[in-house]
Image (cartoon, grey):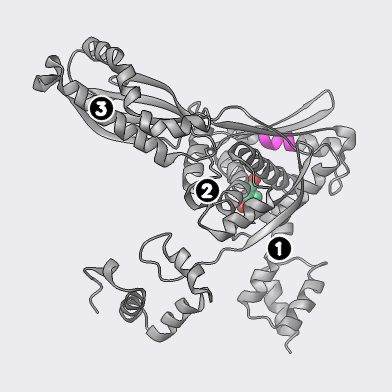
Amino acid sequence: MDKRIDGFSKLSKEEKIDWITRTHFKNSSAAASQLSSYWNSDPSLQTKHDEFIENTLTNFYMPLGVAPNFLINESLFTLPMVIEESSVVAAAGNAAKFWLNKGGFKTVVIDTLKVGQVHFMYKGNPKLLYAFFEKNKKTLLHATSELTQKMELRGGGIVSLDLVSKTTALHNYYQLNVRFKTADAMGANFINSCLESLATTFENLAAKETFFMEKEASIEIVMSILSNYVPECLVKASVSCSLDEIEHQEGLSGKKFAEKIVQAVAIASCETFRAVTHNKGIMNGVDALIIATGNDFRAIEAGVHAYAARNGQYTSLSKASIIDDQFTMELILPLALGTVGGLTKLHPMVGWSMELLGNPDAKKLMEIVAVAGLAQNFAALRSLVTSGIQKGHMKMHLFNILNQLGAKSVQKEAALNYFKKNTVSVKAVSDFLHSNET
Ligand code: MEV
């Protein structure tokens, strides 16, 4: 069967499904009905989801769970978490409970600056370029005023515009480096529109200068785009309590437990293999909230990991210390988030999640997300330095194993009971099911 096709995007949804299932599946009608079984029974809701992307055939479920009891700056929150990995939501809830009676989480937004760049090539005299830029800087900024006016009313806009030479890294490469504030929007469209307008104006102004007219000295715009690296869009979350307040943890005294957490963070700070997994645990919490609130988790992931490597070595995003018998953990994250625009108005479950969080503005959402990351990090380390990760993880995974093995509901009930006291593994669950066949 020929798997090439022209004009696929122009086919109707039914035609696309028909072609896909006939071309790629052994049992095309089963494949087609699997797709339709995931459609929403409300056609208008389904259309909304269809229209988020192109060539939509069906929906792909992710569970939305909630983690209650998060005390953040004296207010209580229940976090919506969209994630497929078992035990993450439970871990968040446990961490929230641990810190609930120890002052909870404290947060502060450090700054909210975002960056965009017009990348261009110029082979002429740098002095002439800098003089031209200084002479025209106001005109350049003025050219974006139609775009920036509304954003300025909301407290955002262009914060700085600089000409930067990158010629030591790449021959003839310069950039217009622009810093923005985008209020409650993530701001990608606003930033990119401003940059493209700057680039066009820059080129047009240059075309009027005689020295740029020489072929050698012309300005050649390569591209204009925002950066997902946001080391000036930072939020800090922290927790702190005295060692006396920490209950025994699986046989460890509170002091020993805190010391082991400090050691674990020190290891992640100097050892890249560990740092990546340590930070992955943080992102379990971050991404779950980012998805639930309709933000762009790829942008956040890219920016966070670049930040973790900002000093030339990839390192732990969190810190932990014991000073004067006071145990403290803190996490600083670069988070460019939006609570308006994008999916936030379009996806009904995003609206639901936002209402659950009390309809936070972008800064508040940065704080809540950083807390989710810190909670997840604390919970992971708590397991790792005490019982090990598998005990809790496999307990949570039990349901998945039971489903995989096709357990009936009576068997599931019996298994949940049995594995309260026994170690979970695929083999142990399979053996249990065989000896408890109904
Ligand atoms: C698993 O999803 C995340 C952990 O590996 C994080 C960590 O090791 O810190 C448990």
* Amino acid at the residue labelled 2: Asn
Q: Nearer the viewer, residue 229 or 420?
A: 229
Residue furthest to the right: 244
Q: Which residues are magenta?
A: 261-265
The kind of secondary structure element at disc 1 is helix
Specify which label sits upstream in the sequence, 2 or 1. Answer: 2
Count all numbered tags in the image, as a single digit.
3
x, y percentage for residue 257? Answer: 81, 39
Whether 181 is among the magenta residues is no
Prevailing secondary structure of the magenta residues:
helix
Q: Which residue is mark 1?
A: 396
Which numbered tag is attached to residue 181? none
Which numbered tag is attached to residue 295? 2
Label 2 to label 1, Cα distance in Å?
Answer: 27 Å
Q: Nearer the viewer, residue 204 or 119?
A: 204
Q: Which one is closest to the eye, mark 3 or mark 1?
A: 3
Q: Which residue is mark 3?
A: 201
x, y percentage for residue 217? Answer: 15, 19
Q: Are marks 2 and 1 in contact (CB under 8 Å)?
A: no
Specify which label sits upstream in the sequence, 3 or 1. Answer: 3
Q: Against 122, is 358 above or below?
A: below
Q: Is residue 25 left or right of residue 307?
A: left
